[in-house]
Amino acid sequence: MARTLPELRTLIDAVDLELLQLLNKRAGYAHEVGEIKRLEGSVVFRPEREAQVISTLQHANEGALKDDNIAVIWREIMSACRALEAPQRVSYLGPAGTFSEEAALRFFGSSIHKIPCNSFDEVFHAATCGNAQYGVVALENSTEGVVTRTLDLLLHSPLHIVGEISLLIRHHLLRSTNTLDGVEVVLAHPQALAQCQEWLNTHLPHAERRAVSSNAEGARLAATNPAWAGIASERAGAEFGLHIAAHAIQDDAFNRTRFAVICLPSTLPAPQATGRDCTSLVVSVPNRPGAVHDMLVPLKKHGVSMTRFESRPARSGQWEYHFFIDLQGHPSEPHVAAALADLQNLCAFYKILGAYPLAD
């Protein structure tokens, strides 16, 4: 016989109480771990450990929960347990409602001390000077490519990458009314304007496109003028009391942005290998024929896969370039270590930007 609704609610209430007891039990163990780490002087947050916990649970899952749900739930559990010691201070491009804020919350969980910043430069500065322990910055977009300012800052910064998070980006047109009539100005971050240019050309061809520091800032400004609209997330719309005048206006339905988590090595050393890792580095080679080809030979020789290759002017005035490279694997793995050693011998400039677990 099928259970009745009151019976099911009673069963759910009982399970909720069991879950609460188990979560408090887990929090107690986590607190003990924190005390041991404090006495040892070791760090509380270990992204590779948390990635392994989530991966193990996902592989063991045989129920109705999806893997993505498991990742979100357990990140929140681990975030709440970490906050028993002290919440992480995390800087990101603000104000409230940006995709950078969402990336920070997805990676660390909501039990953090949020430090919104006005620019990528401020995010880096906050994590460098100690105002924040970690920073979260956009690294590349599947439609528009790399975020060049982030690459330029990584080149000279003492910060290194310790994690990444990838978000499916849904851009909405936000304004004080729920129609497209009378839109004179569209405000958004330059990347968002570029990611929505075909839709804007079709639906708002005569509206001025005005670049601002972030999409959430565009939404904030749109709330001040009924003739203005912002391109931002649903979260930003709720934050500033705006209607969604048009849903999902990005030109690429599978538009994603990859974010990097950065910090000082003294805050968190390079995470240990998990078996699913990325190593990011920047190099330059002498300006001579075949130099770029020679740079790739060690990777092929040692069987290391390259997943990203970007060039940026070195600003030397000599038409020289820095090459930003992502490799599959971790420097502690013998074949990766051998490839990196051979590569370094060929380079005029060589810097590892980070080695970290791949995003879920």
Image (tube, rainbow, N blue to C red):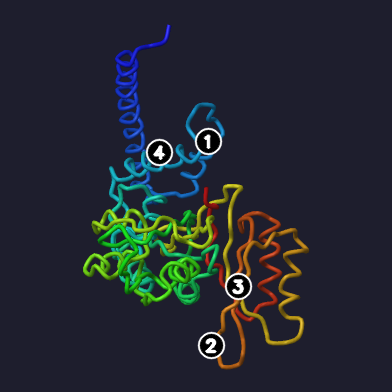
Across the whole image, how many numbered discs are drawn on residues? 4
Q: Nearer the viewer, residue 279 or 256?
A: 256
The amino acid on which the numbered mark 3 sits, given as a three-letter code, is Glu
Q: Which residue is drawn at 39% across and 51% down?
A: 43
Residue most toward the left? Answer: 224
Question: Who comes first in sequence, dot 1 or dot 4?
Answer: 1
Residue 185 vertical placement versus 287 (above, below): above
Residue most toward the front? Answer: 181
The amino acid on which the numbered mark 1 sits, given as a three-letter code, is Gln
Q: Hey, which quadrant is residue 319 in on the image? A: bottom right
Residue most toward the bottom? Answer: 317
Q: Name the residue under label 1.
A: 58
Question: Who comes first in sequence, dot 1 or dot 2?
Answer: 1
Apparent side of residue 65 relative to residue 27 in the rendered image (left or right):
right
Percent position of residue 153, x then y: 45, 75
Alpha carbon separation for disc pair 2 and 4 = 45 Å
**Is disc 4 surrounded by few (<14), some (14 to 19) or many (20+) residues within 10 Å?**
some
**Is disc 3 surrounded by few (<14), some (14 to 19) or many (20+) residues within 10 Å?**
some
Alpha carbon separation for disc pair 3 and 2 = 15 Å
The amino acid on which the numbered mark 4 sits, given as a three-letter code, is Ile
The amino acid on which the numbered mark 2 sits, given as a three-letter code, is Arg
Q: Hey, which quadrant is residue 11 in on the image? A: top left
**Is disc 2 surrounded by few (<14), some (14 to 19) or many (20+) residues within 10 Å?**
few
Percent position of residue 167, x then y: 47, 54
Question: Who comes first in sequence, dot 2 or dot 4?
Answer: 4
Q: Mark 4 points at which residue?
A: 73
Q: What element carries label 1?
A: helix
Q: Name the residue under label 3.
A: 310
**Camera-side mark, 3 or 2:** 3
